[in-house]
Image (cartoon, grey):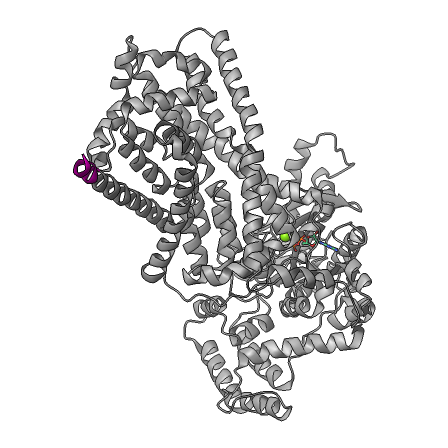
């Protein structure tokens, strides 16, 4: 528990002091060191500060500071003793236990991985935590935090893998996320992972972390590449300059990781002890020097912040720098705590003065250095001056300890491949070939396991059917669960193959190039180059596709992409397509299917353009996309990555589809009727279908079609299985069908039934409706989660249903008209 929760008269033992920099140090210097006993003398609920007795003298702490001290209280210890009755200390049981538990707990270290995208955080995470996370060569693969727990050197580590960021501003959701994690979760150690083959840009983030005044250890990752390139780096020197220990690592092979965690233990232990901390230069906190003028501005604002009591949760230096950079989120934070606005007023004043007096001079200096500057160049504002100063600091540090091998051939192959795949014209055919190959393998190779699975489920249904006696339970198992889930599971091989290709492209670095060359096209419709990948993934399953939109930094493009993904024809729709196409258009099957896919894509383009004009407001950010060097992905990583995506699909099957299958089955099974023919006409399902039939009439649908579509709201796969049920049970000879529900034979028979009960025009209209109408429940939930608002989820439901209805109605009505004209 926290020290602030300890009631008057109670005792506890300190486990650790969290928080950062100066504040933590102050608390430690007052004597709150791990293992020390504290007693609360006065803790009135509304009273601040709280009085404590510690080592026989009294101190008082502000409540906010007391919240930074983790303790074990006597009460907790007592409770623990009851649970561990094998623990028998000699005297004063709870007292001894308190120390014992505090000692144990202080051996847990919370570590957060922070670094640029693609620097190897997840690789390190995986090796350390033996976890199975996706490792990719494509920025943005890690999109929310992953926690792994493991032990090393007698300590337990809670390791958190955070999303990759280039900076800590409030610019993208990842950046905000990382910042919030550091501030709110107060990890004991920040493990800053740095790509050694790209130091300048990686260290920029490090300078911002230094501003936050947190305890850090640096993993100098990709050290193998640094060595191979022949560059030279004086690590000891860099470590002294940055004020943190640096451990060279190779995330791919795991080299250096043990040493890294040994170092973390060392830093953690020093950190809880005020005296040991200063012993080595690489363990001391430094300030990134922004140059005299800027430093003066920062320290003026900092004093103001300090006087307004801002020193408790955040480093005032960090806060000062951030609000000088016009950080909107922290501005709001300051405004809330300082309603009369004097801090922000001072900020504006400082920023104005800076621009007028110093910013002008900075530009002049640029001109005198011979830089190309147009005459009407604006004086530099404080925000960009801070960025420049940070880069200058990094360059200065590197100048002292790093020298580049100009003759390095490390990434020569990357340049060669890029000359082809990002070529202005050749890039597109290459891309098309890659895509074609991907889809070819997905469907051609995928057909084999699909057939096996189909056979397997048919067999399973038969076995279960034979073994059980007639009755609702048998029907539930065979017609409900096995048929429902089976019809979905057969697509798993296709999906896995598609995702295997996508994972390989991501992990090798090709996906970044694909996004790069697609950007011009995507941009025209208000989307982003990176929108392309999630849209392609949508052909597999919309749910992981919607989740993949997280890689798009630009909020507007991200939202637009999410909204149009449901138009991408996911594999769940294939079974219905197959049934309807076989029934009516078997001669042109390939064309009709192709046409549906294309229509979906065209619709998504039109919709994106439409929404970006009328609904989704906001400026698109300029396209900034890193092209990482090509790296041969490890087979393990690609397989893991594939599995991660496939898992979402399976999850959906185990939950929503299973549930929907049971509901659909129950609605069509009850109320039971001895006569099978009337059964279908009288079931609850039929009642619902007949109720909505009038609305669906203009699209050309009868109650059976309506009800199948309605069932598809749970999951699109269910449309096919529902049709199997409503058409089969309405036709006497088809009753035998249910015995081998999932074989191809069966599909053909359903097609036959459908042909007797539906007109080709109505079938075509239904195909259109299925393509466009409401995404399944899982997708809707995914949209809600990713956009953060129910509003957009509801919007998607409304617009897709509306669109489907309009398109199908137009199609059917015009079609009928032509039909009469022609006959
Ligand atoms: P993250 O985005 O920071 O989580 O980075 P990942 O862990 O996904 O790694 C990005 C790419 O770098 C992958 O292709 C890894 O295989 C590769 N990688 C990671 N660490 C190293 C390393 O130390 N050396 C080399 N050569 N490659 C690495
Ligand atoms: Mg990662």
Q: Taken as a whole, is the magenta stretch helix, strand or loop?
A: helix
Q: Nearer the viewer, residue 525 or 393?
A: 525
Report if residue 442 lies within the magenta region: no
Give the image quarter of residue 187. Answer: bottom right
Q: Where is residue 2 in the image (x, y as percent from the top left)?
A: 60, 51
Q: How many marks?
A: 0
Q: Can residue 167 be seen in this view?
A: yes
Give the residue at the far top of this rendering.
469
Q: Position of residue 441 (x, y in %)?
A: 58, 39
Q: Nearer the viewer, residue 818 or 798?
A: 818
Tell me: residue 170, above or below residue 568.
Answer: below
Q: Where is residue 696 in the image (x, y as percent from the top left)?
A: 23, 35
Q: Residue at x 33, y 16 (%)?
A: 729
The range drawn in magenta is 816-823
Q: Position of residue 262 (x, y in %)?
A: 80, 53
Q: Quarter holding the C terminus?
A: top left
Q: Which residue is drawn at 55% across and 35% down?
A: 444
Report if residue 818 lies within the magenta region: yes
Q: Residue at x 75, y 74 (%)?
A: 398
């Amino acid at each position: 528990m926290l020290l602030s929760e300890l009631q008057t008269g109670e005792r506890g033992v300190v486990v650790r002091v969290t928080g950062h920099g100066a504040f933590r140090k102050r608390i430690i210097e007052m004597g709150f060191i791990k293992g020390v006993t504290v007693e609360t003398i006065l803790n009135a609920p509304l009273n601040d500060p709280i009085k404590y007795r510690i080592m026989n003298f009294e101190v008082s702490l502000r409540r906010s500071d007391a919240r930074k001290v983790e303790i074990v209280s006597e009460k907790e210890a007592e409770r623990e003793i009851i649970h561990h009755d094998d623990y028998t200390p000699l005297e004063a049981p709870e007292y001894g236990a308190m120390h014992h538990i505090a000692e144990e707990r202080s051996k847990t270290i919370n570590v957060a991985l922070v670094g640029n995208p693609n620097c190897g955080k997840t690789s390190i995470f995986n090796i350390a935590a033996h976890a199975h996370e996706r490792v990719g060569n494509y920025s943005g693969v890690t999109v929310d935090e992953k926690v792994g727990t493991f032990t090393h050197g007698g300590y337990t580590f809670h390791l958190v893998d955070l999303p990759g960021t280039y900076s800590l501003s409030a610019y993208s959701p990842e950046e905000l996320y990382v910042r919030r994690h550091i501030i709110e979760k107060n990890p004991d150690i920040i493990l800053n992972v740095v790509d050694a083959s790209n130091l300048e840009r990686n260290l920029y983030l490090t300078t911002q972390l230094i501003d936050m005044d947190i305890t850090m250890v640096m993993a100098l990752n990709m050290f193998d590449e640094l060595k191979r390139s022949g560059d030279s780096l004086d690590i000891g020197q860099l470590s002294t300059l940055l004020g943190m220990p640096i451990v060279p690592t190779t995330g791919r092979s795991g080299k250096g990781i043990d040493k890294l965690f040994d170092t973390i233990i060392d830093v953690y232990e020093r950190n809880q002890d005020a005296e040991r901390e200063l012993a080595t230069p690489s363990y001391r906190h430094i300030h990134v020097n922004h140059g005299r003028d800027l430093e003066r501005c920062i320290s003026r604002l900092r004093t103001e912040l300090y006087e307004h009591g801002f020193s408790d949760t955040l480093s005032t230096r960090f806060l000062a720098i951030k609000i000088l950079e016009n950080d909107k989120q922290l501005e709001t934070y300051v405004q809330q705590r300082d309603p009369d606005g004097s801090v922000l007023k001072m900020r504006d004043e400082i920023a104005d003065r800076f621009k007028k007096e110093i910013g002008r001079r900075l530009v002049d200096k640029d001109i005198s250095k011979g830089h190309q500057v147009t005459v009407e160049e604006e004086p530099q504002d404080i925000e960009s001056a801070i960025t420049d100063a940070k880069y200058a600091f990094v360059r200065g540090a590197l100048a002292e300890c790093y020298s580049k091998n100009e003759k390095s051939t490390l990434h020569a192959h990357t340049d060669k491949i890029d000359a082809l795949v990002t070529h202005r014209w050749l890039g597109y055919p290459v891309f098309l070939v890659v895509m074609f190959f991907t889809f070819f393998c997905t469907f051609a190779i995928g057909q084999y396991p699909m057939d096996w699975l189909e056979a397997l489920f048919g067999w399973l249904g038969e076995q279960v059917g034979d073994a059980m006696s007639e009755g609702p339970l048998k029907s539930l198992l065979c017609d409900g669960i096995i048929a429902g889930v089976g019809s979905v599971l057969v697509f798993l091989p296709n999906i896995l193959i598609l995702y295997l290709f996508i994972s390989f492209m991501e992990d090798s670095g090709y996906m970044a190039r694909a996004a790069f060359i697609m950007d011009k096209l995507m941009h025209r419709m208000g989307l982003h180059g990176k929108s392309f990948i999630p849209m392609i993934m949508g052909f597999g399953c919309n749910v992981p596709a919607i989740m993949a939109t997280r890689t798009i930094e630009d909020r507007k493009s991200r939202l637009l992409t999410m909204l149009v993904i449901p138009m991408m024809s996911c594999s769940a729709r294939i079974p219905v397509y197959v049934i309807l196409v076989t029934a009516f258009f078997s001669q042109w099957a390939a064309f009709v299917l192709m046409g549906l896919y294309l229509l979906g894509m065209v619709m998504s383009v039109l919709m994106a353009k439409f929404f970006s004009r009328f609904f989704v407001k906001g400026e698109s950010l300029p396209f900034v996309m890193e092209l990482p060097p090509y790296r041969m992905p490890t087979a393990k990583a690609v397989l893991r990555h594939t599995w991660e995506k496939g898992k979402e699909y399976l999850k959906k099957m185990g939950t929503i589809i299973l549930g929907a299958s049971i509901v659909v089955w129950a609605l069509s099974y009850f109320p039971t009727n001895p006569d099978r023919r009337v059964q279908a006409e009288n079931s609850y399902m039929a009642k619902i279908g007949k109720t909505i039939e009038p609305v669906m009439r203009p699209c050309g649908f009868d109650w059976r079609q309506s009800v199948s579509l309605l069932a598809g709201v749970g999951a699109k796969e269910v449309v096919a299985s529902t049709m199997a049920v409503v058409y089969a049970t309405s036709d006497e000879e088809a009753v035998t069908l249910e015995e081998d529900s999932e074989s191809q034979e069966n599909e053909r028979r359903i097609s036959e039934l459908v042909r007797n009960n539906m007109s080709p025009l109505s079938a075509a209209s239904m195909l259109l409706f299925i393509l466009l109408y409401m995404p399944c429940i899982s997708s809707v939930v995914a949209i809600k989660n990713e956009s953060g608002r129910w509003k957009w989820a509801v919007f998607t439901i409304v617009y897709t249903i509306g669109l489907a209805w309009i398109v199908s109605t137009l199609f059917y009505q015009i079609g009928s008209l032509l039909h009469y004209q022609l006959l």
